[in-house]
């Protein structure tokens, strides 16, 4: 080889090697998690090996054809939290901006008309009259109701405060709805309003709905559809009464409400005396579904006893969504502290509709507990039904306990709904909890008890009754306290992760755990509450827990959500994570969702001593007002 050409050949070989290596590298894209870690490390000038991914989810925005991978990270040395979202090309994106773009695209295509109503319009044509619910803007976000839960309800000061808050709220709503109602009246429409949330009920022709939806006062127009009881009566077998240990709790003197689709007449069943029946929207004949739901809570039958027999029961409801929402107002005014809803509303979607929004607002403004059946669509699309998609409501799945004392053979009912609502980061989880609702024997319309069937309709009143047990003795706990308690008490893991999974939520309820959280003599469980604002410390310790090494422990927090927050309904007004801190001051990360307004942890402590239950503030946009917590260590 010519010595003059040797350097040239060597240079070419080196260039080919470099080029081949570069091509090979380009053909091996960096994993999204590694890319996200590198970006966070670069943005915050920290070593990448200090970062641990604690949550990963995916956002999908169909109209704008956008997707994002979301990563929540933890600095193992400094205890700091970071969030980042990237698109499919690895570019950093703002999920709130993507969500707003999706909302703008929807409004440009359909106006402020909910998808359930869009579907109905396409079915019936422009001339047909359609019953609608018009949701109006509230210009100012009111503070959450924060009556102290540790004051008995028959305390005169509390009763006066609650009544004053209710009246003030109705005055605010009336000021919002009156001008729009008058405008509709002047156009020849008959209207009615809701007293606690700015809703107007009326009938509009399909062609006029878009015009009304474009009014500046209107936030959204929904379909006011027929509501139906949520009952799946397949697979009836021999009678079964779910077994829950109630201990010394009976729900004594707690006002409980049953809000029923197809509300009917009192049959006079002796085991439901002396429940109060509201006749406002009485269908004129007894409803077997309604009697069964009421019996699960209240029945005084010797062997088919209601789980909260000592409670005081209100029974009402209606046949349409608007009637059921009005009856919920009536129940709260009557004094109900826990309200059951075993019904599903109209056209089912994964986005919040009028009833979801209504109960989010009702709970925010009253602090009352509301329970909803998850629905019975598990063998079709699996969608959780309205109003069970709401943030504040406690949604309940249905499991089959096989009529045995053992938990080993328990299974989720295949029909129990579990597909989650859409949200900005795509990681909301519904239902929160499950209860036995399969092959239930309880009160009927013939004066006795019999097999009522199966469905999430019958799981929900079990959780409602547990809410009454929590309120036993006339205490009126916040909804957030009750949600945290029932999730911690759901220690029967039926499927998936013991902490939280798709179909059973936090698990199957075991009400005896509630006894422990209520009884001061038990030192392995507790519950509590606090006001919470965005000015709270980044790390806020809610309580100390004396835990024993090796003993399984569950903890949960839940906080309130306001419908007037700018990010609603895509995400909560606060992103709070759940942590515990060991006696040796080591932080354990237990739960770090983006879009839930609750967090739950299930862990085994490695040290005996006092552990801290800690809330980590990741983001806070407006004040949640209330936060509830609960914990329980296995004896």
Image (cartoon, rainbow, N blue to C red):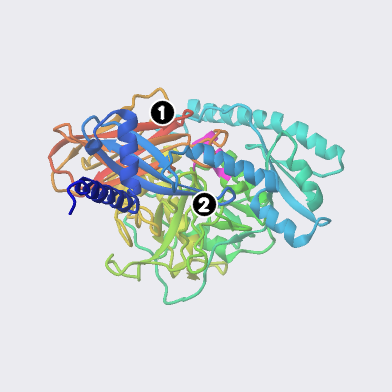
Residue 207 belongs to magenta span:
no
Q: Nearer the viewer, residue 11 or 41?
A: 11
Q: Nearer the viewer, residue 560 or 20?
A: 20
List x then y, in percent, for residue 197: 63, 37
The image quarter containing residue 87 is top left
- Residue at which label 1 appears: 532
Which label belongs to residue 486?
none
List x then y, in percent, for residue 481: 39, 39
Q: Nearer the viewer, residue 320 or 475?
A: 320
Using the image, determine if residue 629 lies above or below residue 257.
Answer: above
The image quarter containing residue 303 is bottom left
The image quarter containing residue 185 is top right
Q: Residue at x 69, y 60 (%)?
A: 283
Q: Magenta stretch? A: 357-369
List x then y, in percent, for residue 67: 48, 48
349 relative to 451 in the view: left or right: right
91 relative to 326 in the view: left or right: left
Categorize mark 2 by other alpha carbons within 10 Å: few (<14), some (14-19), many (20+). Answer: many
SS at circle 2: loop
Quadrant in which the N terminus appears: bottom left
Contact, CB < 8 Å: mark 1 with mark 2?
no
Which label belongs to residue 388?
2
Is residue 443 at all visible to an observer of this figure? Answer: yes
């Amino acid at each position: 080889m010519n010595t003059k050409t040797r350097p040239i050949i060597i240079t070419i070989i080196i260039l080919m090697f470099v080029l081949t290596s570069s091509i090979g590298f380009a053909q091996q894209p960096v994993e999204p998690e590694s890319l996200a870690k590198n970006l966070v490390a670069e943005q915050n000038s920290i070593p990448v090996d200090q970062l641990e991914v604690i949550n990963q989810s995916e956002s999908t925005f169909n109209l704008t054809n956008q997707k994002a991978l979301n990563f929540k990270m933890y600095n193992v040395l400094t205890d700091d939290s970071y969030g980042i979202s990237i698109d499919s090309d690895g570019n950093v994106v703002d999920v709130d901006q993507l969500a707003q773009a999706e909302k703008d695209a929807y409004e440009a295509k359909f106006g402020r008309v909910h998808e359930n109503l869009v579907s109905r319009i396409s079915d019936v044509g422009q001339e047909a009259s359609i019953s609608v619910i018009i949701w109006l803007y509230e210009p100012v976000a009111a503070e959450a109701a924060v009556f102290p839960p540790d004051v008995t309800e028959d305390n005169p000061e509390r009763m006066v405060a609650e009544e004053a808050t209710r009246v003030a709220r109705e005055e605010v709503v009336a000021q919002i709805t009156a001008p729009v109602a008058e405008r509709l009246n002047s156009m020849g429409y008959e209207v009615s309003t809701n007293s606690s949330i700015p809703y107007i009920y009326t009938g509009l022709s399909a062609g006029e709905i878009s015009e009304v939806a474009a009014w500046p006062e209107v936030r959204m127009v929904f379909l006011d559809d027929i509501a139906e009881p949520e009952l799946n009566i397949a697979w009836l077998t021999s009678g079964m009464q779910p077994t829950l240990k109630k201990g010394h709790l009976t729900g004594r003197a707690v006002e409980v409400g049953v809000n029923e689709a197809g509300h009917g007449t009192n049959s006079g069943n002796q085991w439901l005396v002396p429940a109060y029946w509201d006749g406002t929207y009485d269908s004129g004949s007894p409803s077997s579904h309604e009697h069964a739901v009421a019996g699960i809570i209240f029945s005084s039958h010797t062997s088919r006893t209601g789980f909260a027999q000592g409670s005081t029961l209100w029974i009402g409801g209606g046949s349409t969504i608007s009637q059921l929402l009005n009856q919920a107002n009536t129940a709260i005014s009557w004094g109900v502290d826990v309200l059951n809803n075993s019904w599903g509303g109209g056209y089912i979607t994964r986005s919040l509709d009028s009833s979801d929004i209504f109960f989010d607002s009702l709970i925010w403004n009253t602090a009352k507990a509301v329970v909803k059946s998850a629905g019975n669509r598990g063998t079709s699309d699996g969608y959780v039904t309205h109003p069970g998609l709401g943030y504040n409501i406690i949604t309940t799945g249905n499991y089959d306990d096989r009529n045995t004392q053992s938990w080993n053979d328990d299974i989720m009912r295949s029909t129990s709904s579990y597909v989650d609502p859409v949200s900005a980061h795509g990681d909301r989880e519904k239902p929160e909890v499950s209860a036995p609702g399969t092959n239930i024997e309880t009160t009927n319309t013939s004066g006795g008890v019999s097999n009522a069937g199966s469905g999430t309709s019958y799981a929900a009143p079990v959780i409602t009754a547990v809410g009454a047990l929590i309120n036993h003795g006339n205490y009126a706990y916040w909804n957030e306290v009750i949600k945290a308690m029932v999730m911690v008490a759901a220690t029967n893991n039926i499927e998936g992760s013991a902490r939280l999974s798709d179909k059973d939520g936090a698990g199957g309820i075991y009400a005896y755990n509630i006894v422990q959280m209520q009884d001061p003599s038990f030192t392995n469980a507790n519950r509590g509450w606090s006001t919470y604002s965005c000015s709270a410390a980044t790390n806020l310790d809610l309580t100390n827990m004396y835990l024993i090494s090796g003993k399984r422990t569950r903890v949960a927090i839940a906080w309130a959500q306001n419908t007037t927050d700018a990010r609603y309904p895509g995400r909560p007004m606060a992103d709070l994570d759940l942590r515990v801190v060991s006696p040796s001051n080591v932080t354990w990360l237990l739960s770090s969702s983006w879009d839930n307004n609750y967090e739950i942890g299930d862990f085994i402590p490695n040290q005996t001593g006092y552990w801290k239950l800690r809330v980590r503030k990741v983001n806070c946009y407006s004040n949640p007002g209330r936060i509830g917590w609960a914990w329980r260590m296995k004896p």
